[in-house]
Amino acid sequence: MSSGQIVIRKKAQYNNDIEKNIAEIVYQLIPTFEINVEDKKWEDADKSIKEEITALDEKQKEEIKKLDEKQKEDIKNLDNKIEDVLENKIKEIDKRLGDNQGNLSDEIKAIKKEIEDLKVRKPLDLIVKLDNSRLQDLGPQHCQLPTLFNILRDYTFTYT
């Protein structure tokens, strides 16, 4: 139920007593009325908006899940490629050991360097914490992101 008050902004000038009596009756009668308002259309609109937001939220969660799965698959593929490279290097070492050719220590040093280079190139997970806020996982990032941060921190970039 809604309620309100009638405010008379300007008193009207009446030409005769009948108009004055009718106005007084109207001003006395109207405040006794009760106004019932149905908000059904607004409630339905609110419900439909809520359903649309829920549907969009579900769709967004599905998209995020698909992206996470794709990211995991990409990381797994990179790991498989690294394993393949390492297996090939081990086969080369076995071949050299079997043939007794070349300097073995130089080959081992080269392989160690390649392994270290592959480890450095691996995507890194970035987790950010600002002051007292909770941790925010930004997921895997490019392997050269720390270098970019160092450049930005040191102001070593220039524009030409």
Image (cartoon, rainbow, N blue to C red):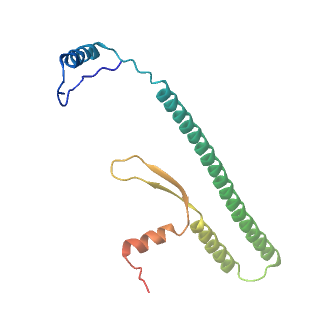
Q: Is residue 104 left or right of residue 23?
A: right
Q: Residue at x 39, y 17 (%)?
A: 36
Along the line of sight, the residue nearer the viewer: 87 or 129: 129
Along the line of sight, the residue nearer the viewer: 3 or 93: 3
Q: Which residue is drawn at 47% across and 29% down?
A: 42
Q: In this view, does 59 lie to the left or right of 98?
A: left
Q: Which quadrant of the rendered structure holds the N terminus?
A: top left
**Residue found farthest to the right:** 99
Q: Position of residue 10 (x, y in %)?
A: 18, 31
Q: In this view, does 41 lie to the left or right of 155?
A: right
Vertically, is 70 above or below 118?
above
Vertically, is 86 above or below 63?
below
Q: Residue at x 57, y 68 (%)?
A: 120
Q: Which quadrant of the rendered structure holds the C terminus?
A: bottom left
**Residue found farthest to the bottom:** 160
Along the line of sight, the residue nearer the viewer: 114 or 13: 13
Q: Position of residue 154 (x, y in %)?
A: 37, 75
Number of numbered discs visible in the structure rendering? 0
Vertically, is 103 above or below 132?
below
Question: For residue 124, which quarter of the picture?
Answer: bottom right
Q: Where is residue 112 in the image (x, y as percent from the top left)?
A: 63, 72
Q: Which residue is drawn at 59% across and 64% down?
A: 122
Q: Position of residue 26 (x, y in %)?
A: 26, 17
